[in-house]
Amino acid sequence: MNSNEFEEAYLDMKSGKLDSALEKFLKLVEKEPSAEVWINIGNIYRRKNLLAKAMESYKRAMEINPESAEALFNMGCTYYQMGKYFEALNLLKKAENLGLKDPKLKIVKALCRVKLNLPNPFEGLSDDERKLVKDLLKDG
């Protein structure tokens, strides 16, 4: 994979130029499919609220790398956005079991537990993380 092309697409995505980034990532994935590129394509679709396309992209990443904790995490986040909290929580736990250390993981898991009315939804969270979860729940 051409790292300059990847970096250019990634920078476009980070700066909010989603259409440009998507076009570049789709060209990259045609040349050389990779889980990392499919995950970024999914992230763009998710930011554009095209959740079915995002989920399909994450599944393509999983076909290339079935142990991709990052793809599982992003699929879990997409399920959360869809209101499928049980499915989201299961995928987030799998990502965690595969060693994902993203600090957002604990937050999204807690949001799922709250939405599912599970006991001790804030267990294992710091005071700042609890506040963040409560603020996110207030905002919708």
Image: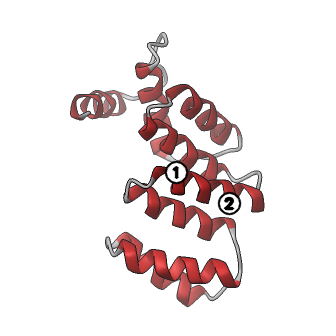
Closer to us: mark 1 or mark 2? 1
Q: Residue drawn 37% across and 59% down?
A: 48
**In x, y percent, where is residue 130?**
34, 27
**In the image, what residue type sits under mark 2?**
Ala
**In the image, what residue type sits under mark 1?**
Ala
Specify which label sits upstream in the sequence, 1 or 2.
Answer: 1
**Residue 66 appears anywhere in the view:** yes
Q: Residue drawn 44% across and 13% down?
A: 117
Looking at the image, the residue that sits furthest to the top is 119
The residue that mark 2 highlights is 61
**In x, y percent, where is residue 69?**
66, 49
Dots 1 and 2: beta carbons under 8 Å? no
Q: Is residue 112 above or below residue 59?
A: above
Could you tell me which quadrant the C terminus lies in?
Answer: top left
Q: Is residue 3 above or below residue 133?
A: below
Crowd band around label 2 with a 10 angstrom C-alpha radius: few (<14), some (14–19), many (20+): many
Image quarter of residue 60: bottom right
The residue that mark 1 highlights is 52
Q: Residue drawn 40% across and 72% down?
A: 13
Give how far apart the Cα atoms at labels 1 and 2 are. 14 Å
**In x, y percent, where is residue 9?**
47, 80
Q: Residue drawn 64% across and 42% down?
A: 95
Q: Secondary structure at mark 2?
A: helix
Q: Which color scheme does this rendered protein use?
A: secondary structure
Crowd band around label 1 with a 10 angstrom C-alpha radius: few (<14), some (14–19), many (20+): some
